[in-house]
Amino acid sequence: MHRSFWLLVIGVLTGLVVAITAFSLQPHALRGSVIDPPIPAPEIALGDFRLSEQRGKTVLLFFGYTYCPDVCPATLGEMKQVLKGLGALADRVTPVFITVDPQRDTPEKLAGYTAAFDPRILGLTGSLSELESVWQAYGVYRAEQPAGKGGQYLVDHSARLYLIDPQGNLRVTYAFGTPVEDLLSDIKAIIRNRR
């Protein structure tokens, strides 16, 4: 009877190991708006940055502006949380913030703004024609509102995060307010090539 008990224990443990291994090998179900099949991400060439030079890294991309009162700081705060949550894996991610307000967002202003959230977030701008081609390639909506008192104005803009995999493919987009845990889960799966 003692021997039968140990055989049963060994059988149960073996079954658990097989089940856990099978589960861990399952492909990860991405949690954003999945682009299936993935498509090559349109090139971005702004300043010294070239998206094509980011191969081997996962790129987390957002379009916004430094004077944004709500969506942009919230999204950059989420990017900061993602980088923190990735720990050592954060070295394999390039977080990018591209302006939709080139009149006011100078390279210096963008650098200071993004660094306030995390110095690893790249703030990019360019000429209006350079930016317009990037906005169009990524389907970014933007519209300047009439200036108010003091000459300040708001810019309405789309608020999606784009996830580009290490092979340079656009894989997933995320609506504003997607939980950080979902972003982390997807990025880890892409980095570990489980998706």
Image: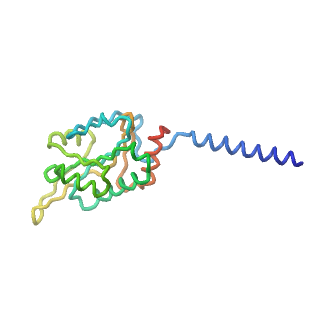
Horizontally, residue 151 falls left or right of residue 172, namely: left
The residue positioned farthest toward the bottom in the image shown: 149
User: Could you say where residue 115 lies in the image, as x and y percent from the top left?
Assistant: 28, 54
Number of marks in the rendered image: 0
Vertical placement of residue 177 versus 164, above or below: below
Report the residue at 16% width, 49% height from top: 102
User: Could you say where residue 168 lies in the image, as x and y percent from the top left?
Assistant: 35, 35
Place residue 11 in its image quadrant: top right
Camera-side residue of 90 and 79: 90
Horizontally, residue 156 falls left or right of residue 160, namely: left
Vertical placement of residue 195 versus 182, above or below: above
Report the residue at 52% width, 39% height from top: 27
Q: Is residue 195 visible?
A: no
User: Could you say where residue 87 lies in the image, as x and y percent from the top left?
Assistant: 44, 50
Q: Is residue 5 visible?
A: yes
Render colour scheme: rainbow
Horizontally, residue 15 falls left or right of residue 26, namely: right
Report the residue at 33% width, 47% height from top: 95
Horizontally, residue 124 falls left or right of residue 87, namely: left
